[in-house]
Structures are given as structure tokens and as C-alpha cells.
Amino acid sequence: GMSPAAADELRLAFKRFRAAGKPILAYSQGLYAQGQVASTYELAASSGNIWMQPASSFQATGVARQDLFFKRLFDQHGVVADFQQRSEYKTAINPFLYSDYTAAHRLSELSWLGSVYESALAGAAADRAMAPATLKASLEAGPYSAEDAKAKGLVDALGQVKDAERAILTKAGSGARLLEFNDYAARARGDGLNVAGVGAAPTVAVISAEGEIMTGRGGGGESPLSGGQTIGSDDVAKAFYKAIDDGEVKAIVFRVSSPGGSDTASEQILGAVRAAKAAGKPVVVSMGTYGASGGYWIASQASQIVAEPTTLTGSIGVFGGKFALGPALARLGIDARGIKVGGDYADALAMGAPMTPTQRAAFAAWMDHIYDGFIGRVAQGRGMAPDRVREIAKGRVWTGAQAKALGLVDGLGGFYQAVDRAKALAGIKGEARLESFNARPTPFEALRNLFGAGADGATVLAPDLGL
């Protein structure tokens, strides 16, 4: 399955594409009971025309995930996971500390998984013109063959790939031809942004941050569609200050899709967000798959935050520590020894042995300082009392829909909904010229150039998102 928030974003693009009078056909050789298959089906449903290969499997019966726990393995081999977390829902390190889900871990995952599932059902039901309860019952009674799925109204047609190709060509009209995706990508217009013409309209700067947050410069593979992206705090801060210094820029849309990273790097980026606001340029965050941990830190003091209903949001917390490998290495005849000069904490993070009680206390104080700072930044940015932030923080992950109810985001939607909000905050009437200020194209920008328009006038809002 695909990322739920990616499905949400593409669903908006599909609806926008269809609203322009252009048909879409979704073709599947099988939907299987793994990962986020419900969101994949939601995206297929938004096409309005789902085809399946005959005799293929339709197994979109729910949402599931599995975690591996290493505690017993570590105990057998003498590895000590010497970590701390703030707080009980900050569960990224739980697989190293426990052999099963803690109550908080289970509650958190069931909560966001349930929210993702309900959102996918609601979207698919709306696009299939079915009641959500009816669709839910039908899906969960599976799995089905493609033939049974068609009989139950879950898909529209059966056929081989060639049959589907002929059908979409007929729908497209006389003279239509098939174009491979890579060829289509090569035909994309420039950066796809400046279609209103330079100087023809006020500028909204677009800055994207995708991946793990780190200090310095980020990057990824050679292709803008490849994975492995990282967010370099120097790169993002530089893009903000460039937009601040540009007199034509009236507002900034900050596209964030990050599960977190360095608190130091996050604070550098947040400082640039504050500087933009201080310069009179509103910053609206558009969240993608993740806006969690450091990803929420850098968004927390934006003028407004827009998230997809299934964006994994929040995780306001911190964890840190080390693996003490000395006992494990000793079993192999390898002795980890160390020397130090200076204070007691100098070798606190050395791998040879767990922290001493005084080192652990110092480490805990440092963790508390970071966590308290995170709470304070969210409280200031969201206009909430610190005690209220503490109640909904504790490292817990929420979906965008849940985060909106809690006041952690301002609205639900995608990139173009964030553009509309940025324009409104900047007092821009009519068209706006969107200009990328990133040093290099990000995966989101590459997809936006292919599937989205450069100007925002053709935006189609999805009414079921509750904007």
C-alpha cells in the first residue's frame, strides 16, 4: 500500500484532473492485505473508474502493521539499550526496551491506525457513492476475487492491461495516444510554477522540507523522485532568508514531510520561520506524510498549519541514549576499554558500558530541557497553555484529523489549500505566482509539477475534508 497522506494528496490531484474534464482509469493486478492497502483503494476510488485483472485478488479488508521487538535478543547477547524517552508515547525506541507493546504504545498505534482507516473509508465511500458503513461491511467481509469485487460494486470492470488501455484511449477521444510516465515527466513545463508570468502577480514562495532533519546541507538521490531525502537545516534556512529578502514575495508556503530528526537543526529552521513572520510574510505549513517530532517542531510557530486527514502529526516528545555493547562484545572475546579526561559526563555516550547513575541523571536533565523547550514552542505557536500541550504531547502520534480537533493544526487539505490560506493572510486577491525557493527539487515538487498546476486558480477543494 501507499502512504495514507500521499493518497490524500494525490486524491485531490485526481479530483482536480477530472474536474478539468480529463478521465482517469485506475488499473490493479491485485490489492493485498498488507500495509496501507485501504488508502491505496481510496486513491483508486477517486479515479471514478477502477479496473482489475481477471482472477486477481481484492484484499482491502483493513489496515495492519507489525513491529519487531528485540529485548529478548539483546538480553541473550548482553546488549544493553540505555535509552530515555519523553514521554510514554514516544515509542520509537520501545522495540529495544520491551518484548511487546506497552499499554501506551498499543493505544497510540491503534488510535492513529483507526483514524487512517476511517479516513480512507470515508474518502472511498464518497467517491464510490456508497454509505461508509456499507462499504466498510463489504470490504471487511473479504477477501474477494476480482470477479466478486466487481459483483459487489467495489470495482467497475475486469480486463487485461491492453483492454484497459483501449478503454481509456476511446474515452480520451480521436487521436489519443499512450504516453509513458517518464516521457510525460520529461514534457513537464520548467518548474511548473511561474505560469502567471514573471511580475504578473504577487509571489508566494514555496519551500519544501522532506525527510529526516539534520544540521548542514541535505539532499538525496540523483532523481528528484528518488527516496533517501534529508532536510539540511542550512538549506531550508537559506531558502527562507532568500524569500524574506525578496520584495516580490508576499507569503510563504512551507511544505513539510518529516518524521523528525535533530532538535538543533529543527530549531535553526524554526528560527527562519519566525524571521519570515517578523518580516511581515505569513508562513503557512502544508504537511505531507509526516509532520511529527522535529517535523512538527519546525511547523509549530507557522502562521497556520494545514495537514492531510491522515498526516502523522505531533509526536511532541524526545528520546535519546545509546546501545551499551561492552557486555556483548566481551562474549566474543572483545574488550571495550576507555579512558577520559575532564568531567564525569565525558564518556556518558561511550559504547562500552551503561551510563553511571550520575551520568544518567545529567542525561535526564538534558532530555527534560529539550522536552520542555518543545512544549514551550508549541504552546507559543499554537496559542495554548503549556499544561494543555503537555496533556496532548507525551510523544503521542496523531493523524491530521485528530490533530485538528486538538488544535495542533488549523485545517485539513493539501498543498493548494495551503496556498489559498497564504494568499488570504497576505491579502492577495486573484492569482498568485508560485515560486520555488529550494536549492534543488524535492520529490514533492517533482510530483506537483507533473500533477498540479502552477497557478492556483484551478484549485478544486474537496468538501469532505471539512476545510
Image (cartoon, rainbow, N blue to C red):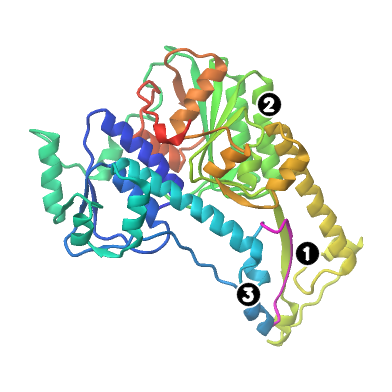
Point out the tag, 1 or 3, that comes first from the N-terminus: 3
User: Label 2, on which residue?
Assistant: 275
Q: Place residue 171 in its image quadrant.
A: top left
Q: Earlier in the sequence, mark 2 or mark 3?
A: 3
Q: Is residue 280 above or below residue 26?
A: above
| Mark 3 lies on residue | 99
Residue 259, position as x, y percentages in the image = 58, 50
Asked if residue 467 lies left or right of residue 236, the reply is left
At 40% from the left and 26% from the top, the residue drawn is: 193
Query: What is the secondary structure assignment of the residue under circle 3?
Result: loop
Left or right of 194: which side holds 83? right
Secondary structure category for the residue under label 2? helix
- Binning the other alpha carbons within 10 Å of mark 3 as few (below 14), some (14 to 19) or many (20 upward) gives some
Measured Cα–Cα span from mark 1 to mark 3: 24 Å
Judging depth in this view, the residue of 333 and 24 nearest the camera is 24
Q: Which mark is residue 161?
A: none
Q: Residue furthest left?
A: 174
Q: Residue at x 65, y 36 (%)?
A: 300
In the rendered image of this protein, does residue 58 appear above or below residue 454? below
At horizontal 30% and vertical 59% (from top left) the residue drawn is: 31
Disc 1 crowd rating (10 Å Cα; few below 14, some 14-19, many 20+) is some
Which span is picked out in magenta? 78-89
**Near-viewer residue (38 or 185):** 38
Foreground mark, 2 or 3?
3
- Specify the amino acid type for callout 2: Ala
> Residue 349, which numbered label?
1
Residue 36 screen position, x and y as percent: 42, 56
Q: Is residue 222 visible?
A: no
